[in-house]
Amino acid sequence: MKLHSFRLRIALLSAMLAGTALAGFAGVSFMLIYQAKLTRLDSDIRSQLLQQALRRPEHTNWSFYEKELPSVLGTDSQTPIGVLVAGRQGETIYQSSNWPSSVDLATTWLPPSGQLPPQPRPFPQQPGNHPLPQPRQEAASGFGEPPSRFPEELPAQLNDQMARQIKVMTKSSHNAAWRVGVLIPPLPRIGTAISLEGIDREMSAIRNGFLISVPVGLVAVAFGAWALSGTALKPLREVSAKIQQVSATGLDRRISTGTADVEFRELLQVFNQMMERLERSFKQASRFSADAAHELKTPLSILQGQLERTLQQAEPGSELQENLGHLLDEVSHLREIVRKLLLLSLADAGQMRLLLVEVNLSKILADLTEDVEMLAPDLQVFSTVEPALLLKGDRDLLLQVLHNLTNNAIKYNLPKGWLRIETQRKKGTISVKVSNSSRDISARDRQRLFERFYRGDPSRTHQIEGLGLGLSLSREIARAHGGDLKLDSTPAGQTAFTLTLPAIQSIKFKPEHA
């Protein structure tokens, strides 16, 4: 599955990496803790066996010794501990009730040759006048004296020799595992078995702690990665917001690179450079259009005047008068193009001048509806206009927008079709919706309908007079008034445009014209 969110991918990848690290850390920690507990238990078992190696088994109260082992080894009272003591011939001297029956130490105690070991020799004497410490005589009461520190007082060589006579291994019984320490002959035959249930319980608690803490840590890492990735992607969001604000009047916007990270600084610099080039090119094109329109305005006015005067001097009904009439229409058409180009250039430069007056939009729409009924008598015209729709704007420019919408509704209508004009006042705005029956507009044409000189599908527009500037200019005029003009989504077989303008909530209305 492909994730389309870069931020989500960063968060998930970070969570995966952190989860792997946490799981590995938990696994290694679990093994190290288990091994440390086992090593500590082995050390305690060896220490106790070394102490008992120097005592005479026949003089030890093994029952008391067994009771003292939990406190000496640091185990809890629920951990079973077994003690097995055998004589030189292998006869059992003492066997506790907890000793696992399935654990047999006969093969461990017997040497490979099967021969009995010789009697243990006395401990070697140190040279000089300092004899080796001798095993302490057991009290008459048995294992009641404090444990002897004899092994620590032995020379290191002797201590190592005795330590090699001790084996610690893991034995399994029917339902549990035991850690068994054994003194190997010629030392006294003593076996100590400690159940691993206590360590297993402790490790189970640690495992449960890992099972809770690791997912919680993983979720915390995921949220942290989500927040950090959001912070890291902040420059990209700023670039995206700036790009969305770019329009004909927003090309001077730049993004500061002073506080940006090094990784994004180059991207922001490239974006600012692109905006500079775009602004320079747009200004040049806009200036050229404005200059050309302004320079053509005067010659066209002179030409129109000369044609009108010549037309008046021509013989009525002559071919010359007819030709001059055609030329005069084309000049008027050309003047209209120049006027619209000049207005668009001023709008692009943010210099469209509005002669703001109080406008009664209800009256304008009423007059416009009468005009439509006269111009298109074969259409069904419906008008739903609220009274006293007041706003402040340039009356001539707003009238041009409404004329453009209704003219398009007439030109692109179907035979015997309909045209509807509706108004709505809502939240300080006035909406004028002009809809009509028409052929369907393709999705591609809908996206480009407000582009300049774009007239859509030629099969739909080739017989209809127009330049492709009306809608573009109407939207610029609406935006210059603080409103907008949009193409609505409609059912098949109709087209609708909605003009939105800010309304005047409370104003002393004065009639525009007497």
Image (cartoon, helix red, strand yellow):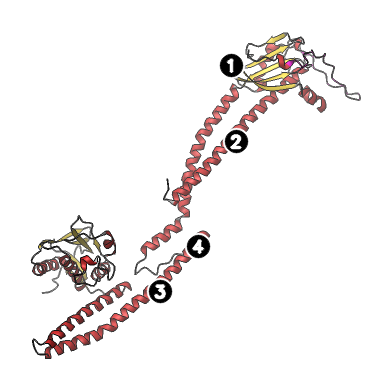
Residue 132 included in the magenta stretch of the image:
yes
**Which dot marks residue 265?**
4
**Residue 174 shows which numbered tag?**
1
Which mark is drawn over residue 280? 3
Q: Nearer the viewer, mark 4 or mark 3?
A: 3
**Three-letter amino acid code at the position of disc 3:** Arg
Is the residue marked by circle 2 packed among few (<14), some (14-19), or many (20+) residues within 10 Å?
Answer: few
**Residue 128: where, in percent of width, then height?**
91, 25
User: Is residue 224 highlighted in magenta?
Assistant: no
| Magenta highlight range | 109-138
Q: Is residue 384 visible?
A: no
For residue 303, side relative to residue 49 (left or right): left
Residues under labels 1 and 3: Cα distance?
89 Å
Kind of residue at badge 4: Arg
Q: Residue at x 17, y 70 (%)?
A: 403
Looking at marks 4 and 2 on the same chain, the residue that comes earlier in the sequence is marked by 2
Q: Quadrant of residue 372?
A: bottom left
Residue 205 against residue 360 in the figure, above or below: above
Q: Position of residue 389 (x, y in %)?
A: 16, 64
Q: Quadrant of the C terminus?
A: bottom left
Instruction: Choose mark 4 or mark 1, whichever is in front.
Output: 1
Q: Name the secondary structure under disc 4.
A: helix
Q: Residue at x 10, y 87 (%)?
A: 318
Name the element at disc 2. Answer: helix
Of residues 330 and 507, the one drawn nearer to the viewer in this rendering: 330
Would residue 20 appear left or right of 361 to someone viewing this image?
right
In x, y percent, where is residue 112? 76, 17
